[in-house]
Image (tube, helix red, strand yellow):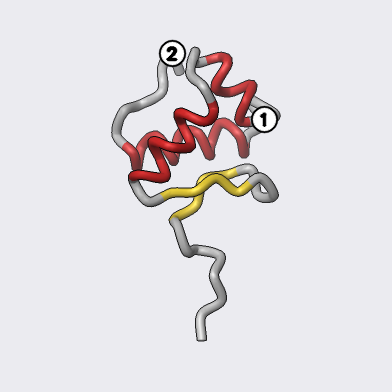
Amino acid sequence: MDYLPKDPAILVSSVNMLLRDEEFDTLESLCFNFNTEPEDLKNYLMDKGFVYSEQQRQFRPIGYDEVRQ
């Protein structure tokens, strides 16, 4: 992959795949490779409804981990 996609859904899928398949060991190393700042990526995806989970090393929909009653 030469660049990060602009579409939020494809971007989340791509970033999660690259982290899951261990192409990159951290979000920071992934962002460095694609010449973007981690906070910029997190903020962009937060605006689109996704939040980064450090524990899971992936972006997830906001509210995904909340307990449902």
- Cα gap from disc 1 to disc 2, whole angstroms: 18 Å
Mark 1 or mark 2, earlier in chain: 2
Q: Position of residue 29 (x, y in %)?
A: 64, 21
Q: Residue furthest left?
A: 7
Q: Position of residue 41 (x, y in %)?
A: 46, 31
Q: Residue at x 54, y 22 (%)?
A: 31
Q: Amino acid at mark 2?
A: Asp
- For disc 2, the neighbor class at 10 Å (few under 14, some 14 to 19, many from 20) is few
- In the rendered image, which quarter is residue 1 located in? top left
Above or below residue 46? Residue 63 is below
Q: Is label 1 in a helix, a strand or a loop?
A: loop
Q: Is label 2 in a helix, a strand or a loop?
A: loop
- In the rendered image, which quarter is residue 30 located in? top right
Left or right, 55 with respect to 61, comes to right
- In the rendered image, which quarter is residue 2 located in? top left
Q: Position of residue 54 (x, y in %)?
A: 66, 45
Q: Residue at x 69, y 49 (%)?
A: 55
Compare residues 61 and 43 and report the one nearer the observer.
43
Q: Residue at x 43, y 49 (%)?
A: 50
Give residue 26's mark: 1
Return the residue at label 2: 2
Q: Amino acid at mark 1?
A: Thr
